[in-house]
Structures are given as structure tokens and as C-alpha cells.
Amino acid sequence: MEAPLILPRKETWTDHEYVRRAAAQGPVVRDRHGIFITFSYDHMQQLVDPSLTRQMETETMALQGINSGPVFDLFNNAMLFSNGDAHKTRRGLLARSFAIPLIRRMRPEIRTLAEELVRDNLDKGDIDFRDRIGGQLAARTITMVLGVPQTDIPHVTKLVYSAIRALSVRSPTVLEEATADLADLNDYVEALLEDHRSAGPDDFLGAYLDRVEDSSLTEIETRAQIIILLLAGSDTTRGALSSTVSQLLQHRTQWEMLCSDRKAHLSGAVSEGLRYDPVIGALIRVADRDMVFENVSIPEGSLVGPLVVAALRDPKVYDRPDRFDITRSDHPRWHPVFGAGEHRCLGEALARAELEEALDALCRLAPNMELTGPPPTIRGLGATRSVSEMRCVLAA
């Protein structure tokens, strides 16, 4: 049986409205790129099974006719787009440096940074929360982890938020801009690594480079892991914080509940914010063999896209899934937004620390903050969704 083609989208539909209508066509549909799309939590769990599918490698590049250059090199050498021994080696060397004890040691610095950003924007009138708070917190935290000098942070932040666009299918003009900034980011990271080669194991990059010395990693692989850490560690957290705070402010009683008892509700607010309108749209995988899934034939090599957006509102998993509820007790033990298996997000602990410290600082210092414009829109069903600006005032 063939999967039905996904229905045309109307501009007025939100992603969630569109997904509900698409899911009504059947458990598996096919989009205009030929990707097989599924909607349920169970299907997402099944289709990330490495016996059925593998992580997408350079297939996105092939779709766009790209076979060389900085974007292709990133896809070809980063752990995020690799499988098997290559993925194990690339991720393992970074994971041993990017350990939970490091995040625990950094927690006070993240708290201080969050407080500083809130105080700097407190009672300053209308601001774009996404860039002034979310974007700065995410970029400055990951650059702090990597030991980027304070004076370089604005330049690196600009490159990161431009280069991240190259990880999704984009128009030729946008891709050209993103590629140029990714090339500049490559040059910067190369120089940064050189500066840290003698820093010693107490320094994050020094410890990473120390492990790389005894490995088979090439120079380009060594650099690609740090670049992907910069990109992934910035954009997703910026969007997740904006989405979470937006929902809290739209559901004022829940915002007040959080502010009145942060200890009881902080973790729940983060988990629900990550679920309700996630910044990850889908987990794109590649079929590793011919298979029949829900009576649909999926040939080997096909792209398969379990929608995280849909899975996180599956009524078989979440009670009243369209309700935003920070007291929800039915979150799975492992939050699906961070992926699954060997490719589960390496920065989960860091992202949660940033989100918790930001919400804590906002509740303490700006409990009367309000949206001053329409809530931000979060659009896209690809790997990373785009978040529009979020106008608000921070008020004590």
C-alpha cells in the first residue's frame, strides 16, 4: 500500500492544526520531498530503532544538490549526522568532556548570567525577549562552556544564529548567507582550538583536545563537533525559553503558580514548555531496509520523519494534550524532545539548567512581566522549528 500524499497547507493553519488534519489521512503520509511522516508517540519510538532506521547523514545535502563546501563538510563530519563507529567515536570524545559534573559546576555561573540578563532588561520598556534574553542566555552559556573570550561573544553569536539556518532546507539566498557565516565560524573555531591546545584538562576544550590526541579524529572532525555544539546549544534553547515563557504568560494563573512556589513547579514548567510547542519538529531518519509499516511499503533509503510536534500531543500518552499544564504528571521518564537512543541530545542537562535558571530569575525579579505583542509563532515540521520575535516588558 502507498502512503497518501500530505494535504496542501493553508497559511492560516498553525502547525498543530495542520498536523491534526494530516493525521486524519492515515497513520503514515508522504510529503512533497517524499518523506514518510508519522504522528504518534509509539510510532516515533518504533522508528528510531536502529534495527529499522539510521540517523540521516548527507541526504539533506543531496536533496539540495550540495556535495562540497562548509555545509557539506559539517554534515559529513559532525556526530549529529553520523552513525556506527564514526558516531560512537565523535560523540564519545565530546561526551566525556561534556559531562554532568561540568554542568553542576557551571550552574552558579548560569544563574548569575540569567539574573544579569533579566536585570539589564528590567523596567526598560518593550523588548524582544527571544533575542535579548533567550538568545543571549543560550549563546553566552555555550560560549562560556567553550571558553570563548567575553569580547568575542557578540561576533560568535551573530555567526551562530546565521549559520544555524544551513542545517535546514532553505532558499538559495538564505543558504548562501548561512554558508558564508558558517565558513567564518569554522575559521574562528579553528583558532579557538589552537588557543586551547595547551590549556590542560581543567579547561573544557583542553580536556577534549587531550582525548582527541589519542583518537583517530581528523582536524575537520575535531572542529565539526565543536561547531555543532555551538549551533545546537544556541538555537534550540533560545526557542525553547521563548516558547515556554510565552505559554506561561498566556496562561497567567500558571505563571502566578510558578512564581509563588518555584521549588514545586520549576521542573514541571520546563518539561511542559518543552512539550507543548516544541522547538524540534521531527526526528528525520533513513530506512535501513525495505519495510512495511502500518501497511505502508517504505523502501530502503527512504527518509522517515516521525513528528515530535504530533507525538508530544498524543492523547494515548498525555491527558488532555492540548492543555498547557505545569502540574502535569504524565510526562515520559525520558522527554521525547531530546530524541532517543544513541543520538539523544548531549546537551539535555545544560538546556534544562538554562531553562530552570531563566524561569527562576524571571519569577524572582520580573513577576509582573507581560506580553506586549502577539505571542511568538513557532513554525516548521523539520528538525528545528523557527521562532518569531516575542515582544514583552519585564516588570518587577
Image (spheres, grey):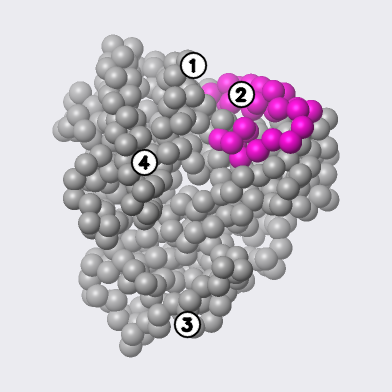
Mark number displayed over residue 150: 1
Find disc 4 in the rendering and name its residue. Answer: 177
Gap in Å between the C-alphas at discs 1 and 2?
A: 13 Å
SS at mark 4? helix
The quadrant the C terminus occupies is: top right
Gap in Å between the C-alphas at discs 2 and 3?
A: 47 Å
Depth-wise, is mark 1 or mark 3 nearer the camera? Answer: 1
Amino acid type indicated by mark 3: Gly
- View extreme (front): residue: 173
| Residue 136 sits in quarter | top right
Please report the residue visible at 66 percent of the width from the left and 22 percent of the height from the top: 116
Gap in Å between the C-alphas at discs 4 and 2?
A: 30 Å
Exactly how many numbered labels are in the figure? Answer: 4
Find disc 2 in the rendering and name its residue. Answer: 113
Q: Earlier in the sequence, mark 1 or mark 3?
A: 3
In the image: residue 88, left or right of residue 22 = left
